Structures are given as C-alpha cells and as structure tokens.
Amino acid sequence: MLLVFFASQLNAQISSENKTLNGVVYGSGSKDKEALEGAVIRWINTKKGTVTDDKGKFTISSEGISDKRIIVFYVGYNKDTVNVDGKDFVEVMLKGSFTTQQIVVEGEVKSSFIDNSEKKTEVITQTELKKDACCDLSGCFGKNASVDVAVTDILTNTKELKVLGLEGSYTQVLVDNMPIMSGLVTKFGVTSLPGTLINKIMISKGSNSVMQGYESISGIMNVLLKDYSTSDRFLLNGFMNSILEKQVNLNGTAKMKDWSTLASFQTVQEPRRVDRNNDSFLDAPLTTRYMFYNKWKYGLKEDDKTNLTFAVKYLDEKRIGGQTNFNYDKDLGSNTVYGQTVNLQNGDLYARWGQKIGKETQMKIFASGSFFNQESYYGITKYNAKQRDGYFNALYEFPVFDKSYLRFGTSYKYQKIDEDIKFLQPTDKTYAGSYEKFESIPGVFSEASFEFPNLNTAVIAGLRLDFHNKYNTITTPRLLIRHQLTKETVIRASVGTGFRTVNLFSENANMLASGRNMIIPEELRPEKMVNYGVDVLQYITLGQISGNINFDFYRTEFSNKVVQNYSMNPMAVTFINHDDAASNVFQIESNLTFFNNLDFKLAYKYIDQYHWHKGVRMDQEFNSKHRVLSSVSYSPRDRNWNINFSAQWFGKQVLPTTKDYPVEFQRPPESDPYAVVNGQFSKNFRHFEFYVGVENLFDFTQTNPIIDPQNPFSKYFDTSYIWGPTNGRTFYLGFRMLFDTL
C-alpha cells in the first residue's frame, strides 16, 4: 500500500510538470464534420494515451516521448497517424471506414471483438486478458462464452479448453499460427503459456481454412504471442493467491537494426498444503514450473518484402497431488500412501518466413519441431510417455481477380508417440503395456477466396488431400461464406469435414487414477465427422449505446466417435467405436457498451451431445446442457482503473452410473446446477499496475468429489467423478511493472 501511495504521489507530481499536447478529433462522413467523443489518442509505439471528451477535445502529456507521432482511432473510422513534433495543438479529421466488404464490430477501442473475416473469429485482446488473473492460457476465458474451461483431473488440476461443447482434443490450438500444441502436449499445453506472454487470442468455431490441416473439428484457437512491436519494452508481473501459490513473469525486448527480439521467463512456485473438506487429499496440487521463451523477428515494417520469425520455448514442470501426507521423495508408487505426480519437459522450436513477390503475391513457409517427455505416477500405476513432432507447411498466394486470391500449398506432419503403463503392485486392471503411435502425413491443399462487392458476399472454398501412413488418403473439403445482408447485419455459414486419431490414455488420464478398469474390446478407429453451422451478427447503435447481438448454431455429426461407456461393465469404463453420435450447440450472446466505458455481456448456450447405443439415445456424461454467462466491466474515460465481475451458471449434468456400488459410494444420476462468480479491481499508474481479485466468490464446491478417499487403493476409489468446482473461494493479488522505453 505504501508503494501504491508513493507511486500515485510521484505520478501526480510528474504529471503537473509534463509538457502537454492539446487537440480535437472530428469525423467526416455523409454529413458535415462532427466532434468524436471517446476517440482514442496514443503515442506511437507506446501504451500512453487518452480519450476525447464530449466535444472531441483531448489533452495528452508528452513527457518522456521521443517519437512525436500520435495514433488516433475510433470505431467506424480509419485509423490515422499524425506527426505533432513542434506543435502544442492539433486538429485531426478521421474518415469513415465502412465498406460493403468489411465491418469491424468493435475496433481497437474494445477489449474483445469479432473479426471481419469469412469465418466468425472472436478476438480477445491484452486489455481483456488483464480483467482476470490470466496466469496461463487456461485462465483467459472467464468472460468468453464460446470456450469452456474444464478440469479433467482434480488431483493435478489438469484442464482442457472446450469449443462447441466437445472435448479439448477436438479443438486445434495454434501458437503463432503453428500447430505445435497437439497429441500428448495438448493436455498440459493449455497451462504452459503465461498470460503475460499472450498478445491476443483468436477463436474460430466450426470448420475453418484447410491450410492448418484436417484436425480442426470444433474450431481453431490461435494464440498469438507477443513480439517487440506488441509488447512493453520491459514487464515484471508478480502474483500470489490465498493458498500462497506464487508466480513471477518477466518480459524484455530489444531492437537491433532490422532485427528485434523478445525474451520471457516464468516461474510458478507451489502453494501450501490445503484440505478444506478433510478427505485427506490435497485440494490443489503442489505445482512448480519454469518456462523460458525467446522470439526473434526480422522485418519490422508492414511493407517489408521479407519477414522472418523464429522462436524457442522450454518448459519444466512438476505437479504433486494426492494424500496430504504424501512425500514425493519416499512414496512414489507406494501402495500405502496415495500420490499422483506429473513430471514433464517440453521444448518447441518454430520458424515462419514470408516473402512478398510484387504487390500482392507472396510465399510463406512454416516449420517446427518439438519434444515432450512425461513421467507420472497414479498411485501404483506408472505412466511414462514420449512424443516427437515435426511440421512443415509451404504456401503460395496470388491474386486472380480484384480482392480475390488463390492459394496453393503442401505440408508434412511427423509425430511419434510412445506410452508405457506399468502396475507396480498386483491389481485386477488389465491395460498395462507399451503403446506406440507413428504418423507420417504428407499433404497438399488449395484454397480460393472470392469477394463479390455487388452481392456483398465473400466466399472461401478449400480442399486438401493428406496421405496417412496407416489410413491412406484423407480428403478434407471446407466452405465458408459471409454475406452482408444490411449495413448492420452479417450472416456467415460454414461446412467441412474433420479427421483425427485418438490418444486414448492421454485424453483419459483421469481414468488412470480411478479404481475402474479400462477395457478396449476392439481396435479404435480414427474419428470422422462433418461440421456445419450458421452465424448471424446484428450491430446495435442507440445513442450512447453500441454493441451487437450474435446468434449461432453448429452441428457436428460423427461417422465414427470413440465413446466412453460406463454401463457395459459397472466396474470399468469401456471404449468403443460409435457410428451414430452428434452434437448440437446453440448460442445467443449480446455485447453492449454504454458511454464508451461500461461493457455488459449476457450469453446463453445450449449443448446437446449424444450417441445411440442399441437403439437407446445416450446423453453425454459430464455435459451441462444449459449454460449462462454474464459479465460487466467499468473503466473511467482515462482508463486509470477498472472493475469487473463475471458470473457463470451451469445446469444439471448426466453422471456415470454407480448403481452397482455399495450404497455409501453411490452417487445421484445427475449433478446439481451451480454458479461461479469472479471479480477483479485493477489500478493503473504510469509504470505500475496493481490488481486484486476473487474467484468463486460464493464459495461453491462439489461435495466430496472423490469416491472412497479413505481407501485410495480399493476398486471403488475414483477421482474422475468431477462435475463442478473443487476449489473454494480464492483471493489473489498481483502487480505489473512495465516500461514502454528503456
């Protein structure tokens, strides 16, 4: 508090001595010029800025600014860069940006918005990410209705990101447009990227471009990491919560002629041991993590003909869960004290090269390689896994008509996975053994994008052929259409196929900790499906209220899906192929902004997942059909502080049957509905930001989530029976120290 007080006093003193620039911003359109209230003015290459008042006027300090250019932008107008060197007053005239080919729903003023591409793309910016703790990627979606964050293993707090209600393995996660987070890496990759390293997240539902492969089934999540141009020159972030988990993040940048670089370091240190429900098991794992990332970029300007980016990341992580008296050094594999541990190392190296040939023709090459090593213990079950990946993609793009392009490309994917499962003590389980998976997949693809201005329509059509070493030719067609019905209404539609092979034990690792056996009575075939959907986006402007209402519906039909069956054997989970499974997802969402500083969101989502078994319709377990999300965020015009709250409500879920268990271990066939409320307050100073927040404000937790915790080596013991929060109310606080120049 003393640090905050003195920083505030120092900031006030410096501001009083600053040199200032005054000005006014107007907008031009079909009418005479008019003053723009709420236009954003920012010094170029900094985050130092202000907004205009109701008369379009502004005042901004130039203290410490060497590059005397300002960037001015306002929703619905073209952004302008103005040189104000030697001036103390400037008048800026912005021109309207509306065309029939492009609509920006909420421009750079907003913390999240919908992009103007053929596919519906939701963009989460750094401003939005700061409204939550966002310690890692999995914590970045507290105010997003399209992505559900599900805990799949309560002892190690393993999470997955679900789009369209489908499991996280159906969502293709890209990092800087590269598919480096796949296979076994997906399980822990969503917590390996710190929020302070993320520039923005782009979420596209349903079928997408064929350029990224055939695995984007429920959608694509593209995580764009910071570089020199999108990062503060220096950032130090510190975080601690009420169970004393600590995190430190450090980002630094440098520029050398045509090269720039960003280096990032993160460490997470384990919390204290907590067991609030007195079941003798830790409520939160003891996590220790070290992450290093370094990105280099050649070509700093948008009009540079050659651009080269390469980056390297290394992660070392240990998670310890289990009984409160478990000792990692003494009790690994013990049959008297139950422990669940994960020890992993993951390294990635990727590069991207772009070369412009003429004005609009260009060539791009993507390449990456990675390794992943994991050693885990689930009580007496030892699980070791290794993965090696290689990826290459070359793309050539050229114009064919005005605003229409054709792309050709080729790709190659290499992936080798080795899994080894051993039981260190006698058991009735039968799935021990070595499991190998090898994929070598060359492919070719073509994609055309067409603009039809007279019809207010744009189309992307793509086709790719991949040649799998085991499953022969995989054909993937995709089609995306955007039609602008009116100035305020946009309709999008998409259809396409998907294909994926299953990583059974990694995707169902929580079953390794269960007393249930895992039975695989037949060879599990690749999953195949078709996904189609439609999206309607309506813009709203009513005086000082602006925003949008969005309706979308997506259906996924599986011609084969690997399904967990809990009823065939009461003491086991059986994995079988199903040729009749489907998912229907409907979502309606409203995003409104009042007076440019109060944001309100309300969304409802209906998820219907099912498969047919012997003529009986079976609903997907652990799926809440009805969900509601609401959030409100307020910042004053100078953006010096922000307060926000979010609430999520989840309806009932169908649960696996326990009717054959002893009475004391039986559970209801459905879960209870529940709600989770989070809140955060943040305060911004010149080079310092302070934030404090709470998660699960009303302290709702699932009662006794572990079945038979007193006997962790019995056949009834089960940690996979999770349908709601297991961690209660948690407070946190943190700070960011940042500098735009060094």
Image: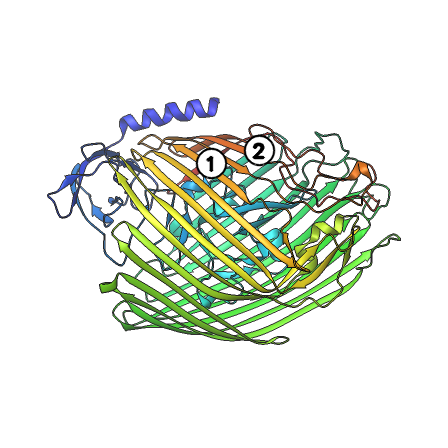
Foreground label between 1 and 2:
2
Residue visible at 62% across and 75% down in the picture: 471
- The type of residue carrying mark 1 is Arg
Q: Secondary structure at mark 2?
A: strand
Q: Is residue 74 left or right of residue 223?
A: left
Front-most of 251 and 482? Answer: 482
**Vertical placement of 183 versus 657: above or below?**
below
Q: Secondary structure at mark 1?
A: strand
**Vertical placement of 361 versus 33: above or below?**
below
Instruction: Give the image quarter of residue 741.
Output: top left
Front-most of 335 and 567? Answer: 567
Instruction: Give the image quarter of residue 523.
Output: bottom right
Label ID, residue 240: 2
Q: Position of residue 139 (x, y in %)?
A: 53, 42
Mark 1 highlights which residue?
Answer: 736
Q: Residues within 10 Å of mark 1 (few under 14, many from 20)?
A: many
